[in-house]
Image (tube, rainbow, N blue to C red):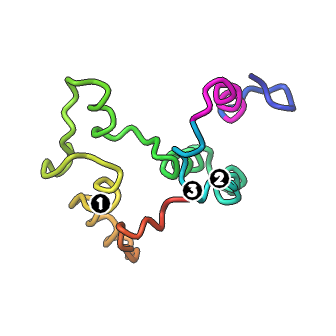
């Protein structure tokens, strides 16, 4: 589980784990099949946690309550911040009142989330 330099990294550990549990290609977003955008995430000049978050976002792997509640029945899928909807990725990023307020505070133009421009 070490990289070329002999040091362990999350990427090297993931690479080994992924070799034994490859998801069928049809479950990955279509644009990721050629992998130019998805593989370029790891070359971004940013903190590893940012690259990891982006990768998880693009691969629908964020542990939002809606996904966790599908695996663990005792988990409530309601958004803990606003309490008005199920906590999905779309809700967390675009529809939750707290998220909308944050986007407006940083003066970020909020795109139409239905266009799925955030998927790779």
Q: Any magenta on residue 15?
A: yes
Give the alpha-carbon distance from disc 2 to disc 3, as whole Å. 6 Å
Q: Give above or below for 28 relative to 117.
A: above
Give the alpha-carbon distance from disc 1 to disc 3, as whole Å. 28 Å
Q: Secondary structure at mark 2?
A: loop
Going by the image, does 108 lie left or right of 47?
Answer: left
At x 31% / y 64%, what residue is drawn? 102
Q: Secondary structure at mark 3?
A: helix
Which is nearer the N-term, disc 1 or disc 2?
A: 2
Instruction: Name the one closer to the observer, 110 or 58.
Output: 58
Percent position (x, y) of residue 9? Answer: 70, 31
Q: Which residue is mark 3?
A: 30
Asked if marks 2 and 3 touch (Cβ < 8 Å), the reply is: yes
At x 69% / y 56%, what residue is drawn? 34
Q: Give above or below for 112 relative to 29.
A: below
Q: Give above or below for 80 relative to 97.
A: above
The quarter in which the N terminus is drawn is top right
Dominant SS of magenta comes to helix
Which is nearer the N-term, disc 1 or disc 3?
A: 3
The quarter in which the C terminus is drawn is bottom right
Percent position (x, y) of residue 87? Answer: 26, 46
Task: Kindly identify which numbered label has been placed on residue 67.
Answer: none
Give the image quarter of residue 116.
bottom left
Q: Which residue is mark 2?
A: 33
> Which marked residue is nearer to the observer: mark 1 or mark 2?
2
Q: Which residue is mark 1?
A: 99
Which span is picked out in magenta? 11-23
Q: Secondary structure at mark 1?
A: helix
Percent position (x, y) of residue 48? Answer: 62, 44
> Which marked residue is nearer to the observer: mark 1 or mark 3?
3
């Amino acid at each position: 589980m070490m990289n070329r330099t002999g040091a362990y990294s999350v990427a090297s550990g993931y690479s080994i784990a992924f070799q034994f549990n490859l998801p069928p290609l049809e479950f990955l977003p279509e644009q990721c099949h050629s992998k130019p955008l998805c593989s370029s995430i790891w070359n971004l000049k940013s903190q590893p946690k940012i690259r990891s978050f982006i990768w998880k976002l693009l691969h629908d792997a964020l542990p939002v309550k809606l996904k966790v509640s599908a695996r663990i029945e005792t988990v409530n899928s309601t958004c803990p911040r606003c309490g008005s909807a199920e906590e999905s990725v779309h809700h967390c990023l675009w529809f939750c009142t707290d998220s909308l307020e944050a986007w407006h505070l940083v003066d970020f133009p909020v795109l139409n989330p239905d266009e799925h421009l955030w998927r790779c």
